[in-house]
Image (tube, coloured by chain):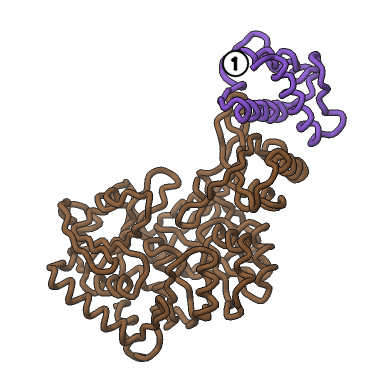
Chain colours: A purple, B brown
Amino acid sequence: MIEKDLVTLFHEAIDDFNIQMPKEQQIAKTNDTVLFGEAGLLDSMGLVSFIADIEQRISSRLGIDVSIANEDALSQSVLPFRTVRTLINYVMSLVPQY
Amino acid sequence: MNIDIILNRLRRKPRNEAIAFKDQGYSNAEILDLVEQWQVFLRDKSIGSGSVLSIISDYSPDSIALVIASLLNGNIVVPLCPAEGRSLEEYLHGARVRHVIRLADSAVVSRRKTTDPAQNNLLKNLVENHRPGLILFTSGSSGGAKAVVHDFEKFLSRYKRAGKALRTLCFMMFDHMAGIDTYFYCLFSGSTAVLPTSRSPSGVCRLIEEQRIEVLPCSPTFMNLMLISGEYRKYDLSSLKIIVLGSERITPNLLDRVTRAFDDVAVIQKYGITELGVPPSKTNCRDPSLIKFDQNHFESRITDGILHVKARGAMLGYLDAPFSMSGDAWFNTGDLAEAEGDYIRILGRESSIVNVGGEKVNPTDVENVLMQVANVAEVEVYGEKNALVGEVVCARVRLVEQDDHRSLITSIKRACAEKLESHKRPVKINITKNNLHCSRFKKSVR
């Protein structure tokens, strides 16, 4: 998967996520949007739900199962779930490149 | 002897129809004849008293007569359905079955090597006291299936007061507690037991029309399938007086739909477990999800949200598990329940609870919301491991008609956002074309 495809996939997931959320909790489609942690838009269930949606989209598009919320992600010194960009970078490291 | 009550009842009204099967009625006298024939058969095959005998069959006049004959013969009876996907050998081994009679077009008898029943204390007591036994298996939803031993005579005592004679469909399986309860209730009450040859919604609706069935006992899962199929609108079901729902939780959504579809039919609930049987109970007429047990037969209390009961006619114990019923013991049913006045409401299985970050989620609460979304035929909610919050709620959904999956998932997520707290919302929703129930018309995962 190339980065451009992954960004598109993220944007689709953000659009769907925003439909269910009140305006103040909607995610802006920018790299710097803080998702989780201090001043983050998502609580833990919001993050779990958003990540699960990304996983499902990757599974249906590429036919592979990735686990984004895994022990490796949780043991990193800076959580990869912090911003849209850090999450995209982390997911890029999990999916095959071609 | 309780079995004599059945025989006397059959003898008293020889012409009454005891069983209807494949467009044919069988009178009480004909059933008595069949019982005698099977008693002779058991003697001829040297299947003696105290022997563990499995009857592998679905319902038929012969299978019911054979169960009665085995009871009279003092056997320990193990009814099993020839259902696909089950290893029958495992069950035969687990119940220490010596003799097997398979009923299809003819009776096939086989003898197995097994340990002497006297090596097991429960079976030994039955044999030594010349008591017939009944062995049923738990569904295995919380651990493996366990062989439950009942004293068959004591088991039947609950039906002595069975009163109303109504044409009743034996829908629940031949080897399931609810199925056994249905046909013994019919035999004791003088009701006609209508035996199904198909358990599809259309097959059942056709049979109700043709046989003028008055009582339909079934699982909530089957009732849901019947409602979404629309088959009930194609047949004359005006004979139906009572729908008996049991063996699973009745969700408010299902209750609402069933009472709207059958507005002049009484909906009642039955509660039963393999270990304790099906006690006499009363359903609240305003809210049929509420049930009250006859405390003379079935004392109940709710401890930590779980239903505990004491029952007369309860099992003697498990064949291979370290548990036996003593007079004062409360039995943990593993069913979540809440009290409302004198009544209780069953909320689902404790073992199916999903623990999301310490918050407990009952899958049936979520299923109740998902079933309200348009075009949803069946749902199955379950837990999946998650590194962030321990477990998350996931759902499989089968549609009535194929539709754009993405827009349906959005509809489901919207409904969940409106009606459920965030930890209860399914984070993964998979649309499937597969049935989400097993051949016994219960949820696949429970």
Q: Residue furthest front?
A: A98
Residue A71 located left or right of residue A84? left
Q: Residue furthest top?
A: A77
Name the foreground residue: B209 vs B247: B209
| SS class, disc 1 | helix
Residue B86 located left or right of residue A25? left
Q: Locate residue B296, reporting x and y percent.
A: 47, 70
Dot 1 amino acid type: Leu
Q: Residues within 10 Å of mark 1 (few under 14, many from 20)?
A: few
Residue at x-position 59% and y-position 16%: A94
Q: Locate residue B165, reporting x and y percent.
A: 48, 83
Q: Locate residue B15, reporting x and y percent.
A: 37, 91
Eyeballing the image, is A97 above or below B384?
above
Q: Quadrant of residue B313?
A: bottom left
**Mark 1 — residue?**
A94
Residue at x-position 79% and y-position 17%: A34
Q: Quadrant of residue B414?
A: top right
> Can residue B368 be seen by looking at this rendering?
no
Give the total number of marks visible in the rendering. 1
> Can residue A94 be seen by looking at this rendering?
yes
In which quadrant is the N terminus of chain A drawn? top right
Q: Quadrant of residue A20?
A: top right
Residue B397 located left or right of residue B188? right
Name the foreground residue: A65 vs B284: A65
Residue at x-position 35% and y-position 72%: B60
Q: Locate residue B18, reporting x and y percent.
A: 39, 82
Residue at x-position 31% and y-position 81%: B31
Residue B153 located left or right of residue B194? left
